[in-house]
Image (cartoon, grey):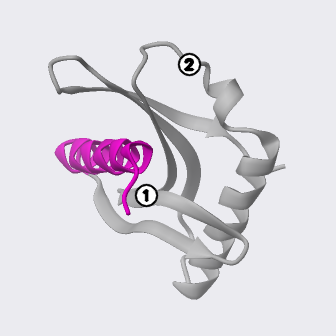
Amino acid sequence: MITPKRLLGDQGEQAVAQWLIEHGFVILARNYQTRLGEVDIIATKGEVVAFIEVKTRKSAYFPISNTITYTKQKRITRAATSFILKNKIQNRVLRFDVAAVTNQISGAYDISYIENAFTTR
């Protein structure tokens, strides 16, 4: 059974994927999972490979710092490392981005895209 929360998240991810394509990105993977973590969207543009965490909410205000914890960053980083090794990605700029999506009353999505939202430590 798909919960309303899961449906909202899936719709937000779809909106971000479309936004990325419209901004010249090519989607390499969606919901890439390993036993160590998950990345919502992996996309490339030029020399950049972006590992993108999508956060979808109904309300317009939510600080990213409260939603992308250090533990979550480590899980994303581990999954990204797996993807890089599995796909033999070399000589590329690697970036961890966050897409904050707000579902508007009109049904449209407001997307705030944050490049380099966090770095590996």
Residue 91 on image: x %, y %: 56, 69
Specify start and end residues of the magenta stretch as a single range. 1-24
Numbered tag placed on residue 88 in the rendering: none
Three-letter amino acid code at the position of disc 1: Ile
At x 65%, y 33%, the residue is: 67
- Seen as rendered, the residue at the extreme front is 1
Q: Is residue 26 left or right of residue 35?
A: left
Is residue 54 at all visible to an observer of this figure? Answer: yes
> Which of the image's four quarters has the N terminus?
bottom left
Residue to which mark 2 is pinned: 62
Is residue 90 at all visible to an observer of this figure? Answer: no
At x 22%, y 51%, the residue is: 21
Dot 1: what SS? Answer: strand
Residue 32 on image: x %, y %: 50, 70
> Is residue 23 in the magenta section?
yes
Q: Is residue 26 left or right of residue 32?
A: left
Relative depth, front residue between 119 and 41: 41
Relative depth, front residue between 11 and 113: 11
Give the quarter of the image for residue 79: bottom right
Dot 2: what SS? Answer: loop
Q: Dominant secondary structure of the magenta stretch? A: helix
At x 72%, y 44%, the residue is: 119
Relative depth, front residue between 58 and 67: 58
Numbered tag placed on residue 41 in the rendering: 1
Three-letter amino acid code at the position of disc 2: Phe
Give the quarter of the image for residue 35: bottom right
